[in-house]
Amino acid sequence: MSGRGRLAVSAALATLLAACSLLPLVKEAGWLLQAAFLLAAVSGAGALARRAPLPRPLTVLAQLVAALALLTWSFARGQAVAGLLPGPDAFREFAMLLSEGGQDVGEYSIPAPVTPGIRLMLVGGVLAIGLLVDVLAVTYRTAAPAGLPLLALYSVAAGLDQGGSRWLWFLLAAVGYLLLLLAEGRDRLSQWGRVFSGAPPAPSRLGAGLESGGGRAAAPLRTGRRIGAVTLGIAMLLPAVMPSLGDGLLDAQRGTAGSGPGAGTITTVNPLVSLQNSLNQPENREVLSYRTNAENTRDLYLRIVALDQFDGASWKSSERPIRPVPDELPPPAGLSPEIATTRVDTSVSASDSYRQSWLPMPYPATRVKIGGRWSFEPEGRTLVGNRRQTTRGAEYQVSSLLVRPTAAQLAAAGPPPADLLREYTEVPDSLPPVVARTARDVTRGAGTAYEKAVRLQDWFASEGGFVYDTQVEAGSGSQAIANFLDQKEGFCVHFSFSMAAMARTLDIPARVAVGFTPGTASANGAMSVGLRDAHAWPELYFENIGWVRFEPTPSRGTVPDYTVPDAPESGTTDPEEPEAVESSEPSAAPSDRDDCPADQRFLGECETPPADAGGGAGGGGLPLRTILLSAGAAVLLLGLPLLPLLWRTRVRGRRLAVAGKEPQDPAEGVLAAWRELIDSAWDHGFPPDDSQTPRRAAERIVAAGGLEEPAAASVRRVAGAVEQVLYAPVPRPVPGIAEDVRRVRAALHASAGRGARLRARFAPRSAVRVVWACSRGWSALAERWNIAWRTAALRVARRVPTRQRG
């Protein structure tokens, strides 16, 4: 196979290895085989185009046409001409499949089924990345930038998959990229001519390069492969021994803060299927326990996050800025001093089996005391973890307000601010008309927003004939809401999502809160919160009161007092310091599992060891070991590409130092200067020719490098000095030869292009002498080992007596 053929195979293999990171996102793996087949076909089309040969742009165009025809044959065969040629109908089919795929991505949890739309997105995406890698690495012969699309492919998968084996997919992608670089290096190596055609030569004073040719090419290539294997091993081991490398740009964990403490934004979460899985657990495993000074805990919901964005496919939280957690949280938006409030102090302890990036706490919190890397999101009044910070084993204290508005105060609430009204009453165009029509029918005759909200709550909870059922198929999109209103069966997600959407159609600002109901009292006086207490409820905004909880789900939670006219208000005792939380032993948490579905991780249902298990969840900084290892890795990763530059600088300095002094043997300084001159020309693109004499080699450097006086005279003077010390009966010292070499190197550098100058400095070709030296050392070591082994075996054989018959 030719060099380009091996490079094309390596490019396709690197793409497929990076595409393996998408496997945990879906339930089936057959799409990867389909992508591999199509990618091989597109690579073959590129190989044929390059063999023709076609110009590079036409080669890329031929591959694009082949890729489009293959995708048409695979996904829109019935709408294409002859099954391959795409027309308007085929493109409409593609658009429909992509639209359905986008909806499926929003509705299904990980791992999702491979629907036709998702299959097209997976196969088409891998094919596009593979084509881009092939164009960069093979057609335009720049393999290094080809790692960017591979990194993009891995980053998409890593941002969606929250499994504990992301390091494995990173290693596969890294292996593919390194194989691609090795293939490109070998291809370039094979084009450098007879410089690499011989075995590592022994030093000699003959020839232009002062080295003899001949032999086989196996030793340098074997050594190059060994160096590549060592480099690959380092790349594979570093992520395993350095937990900090798992964070940063490649760790786009859902529901976490972006960068360092108090910076960045928070991303979206979709708790739909996680809630359903939690509610259907056979065992109500405890995830939280708390103590509070509240006299009645019926309204003490532990809120995790608010979903305030409805795009027609799902409810999710908006991307919002975060900041460091202040000592005192700002006052709740819209809350007037005229509304009765009571301060409640709560001490919470999270189970070791509960890993959640958002901090569950009563709403609205006014003060939070917790250790670790947490940030505050003001709009939703939530705390979110930074850099893999979770609730695992956390203990924290929360001061919150028990807001007690009356029905009259809610009914008298004025209009909300215009910007808040605009943001929180937005509904997608895809929302079926039946949702708004049903909302108007249910609230007909209600005069205020409060009356409309109470009627919606009562209709869902008792009057509308709805049935609570956690086995109903999950769905959060527009059509799922319409189906729920028609079938009237669902669980808390359906009730809260539907009521919030209907409230928005009535111009009432609404969002959905996700968290836990208050739980149940345990024997030791603490409240216990289990997986089955997971819940979702709507929050509606009323001016002068703020965001107010409603409870439309029947048989779940408690109906707020302010939605029941003339109901007595629940109170609390005078605020006191909460009792100290006793350190309870971890609940019966399951053993670490690699097969835990990713959609259960939102509520921390899986026990997986964190990458930084030695650091502790509550620590305020990085361990010293992690810092030292990270610094060492940074030095190693940054230093590896600079090794050729450092080696070449050191060798040049040593040679010119020898040439500049007066050694006992004049030949030593002259030959050192000649070797430096030859290597400098080699670095700038003029490889040595061992068959030429020093004088002929000098003229070749002058002509190839376009050197003018005095640089040309310096080359000839150095060549003449070499002939003098090699053939004169008594070699004489040659003064100023080091300056001649510096002058020639500066002239070569000035006459070269920008790219050639950068390569001569940072990737000098003469650095291959390191490979030769390593190969010679390895061969000598292997030979000594073989001799020693044979000698030892012979001695043992002589000592063993010969068995005689008789």
Image (tube, helix red, strand yellow):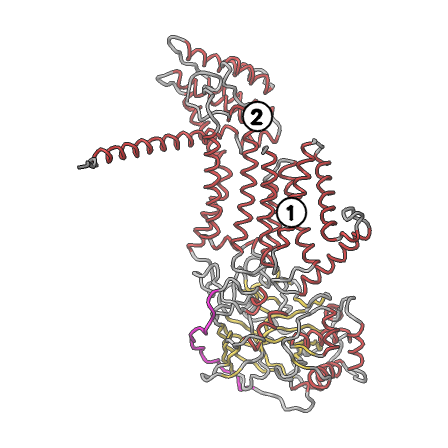
Vertical arrangement, residue 268 with respect to residue 215, above or below: below
Q: Is residue 687 magenta?
A: no
Q: Residues within 10 Å of mark 2 (few under 14, many from 20)?
A: many
Query: Which is more toward the observer, 615 or 572?
Result: 615
- Mark number displayed over residue 685: 2
Q: Quadrant of the N terminus?
A: top right
**How far across and down, in percent of the image, does residue 80 sit?**
79, 50
Q: Secondary structure at mark 1?
A: helix
Task: Select label 2 or label 1 by which is in front.
Answer: 1
Vertical arrangement, residue 49 with respect to residue 446, above or below: above
**How far across and down, in percent of the image, does residue 649 sit?**
47, 30
Quarter of the image for residue 219 reads: top left
Q: Residue at x 81, y 83 (%)?
A: 444
* Separation of marks 2 and 1 at Cα, in angstroms: 40 Å
Is residue 368 toward the left or the right of residue 582 in the image? right
The span picked out in magenta is 572-592
Q: Quadrant of the C terminus?
A: top left
Is residue 566 toward the left or the right of residue 6 in the image? right
Q: Residues within 10 Å of mark 1 (few under 14, many from 20)?
A: some
Look at mark 1 in the image and give the residue it sits on. Answer: 37
Number of numbered markers:
2
In the rendered image, is residue 501 in sight? yes
Query: Which is more toward the observer, 15 or 674?
Result: 15
In the rendered image, is residue 681 in sight? no
Is residue 43 toward the left or the right of residue 282 in the image? right
Q: Is residue 584 magenta?
A: yes
Vertical arrangement, residue 81 with respect to residue 164, above or below: above
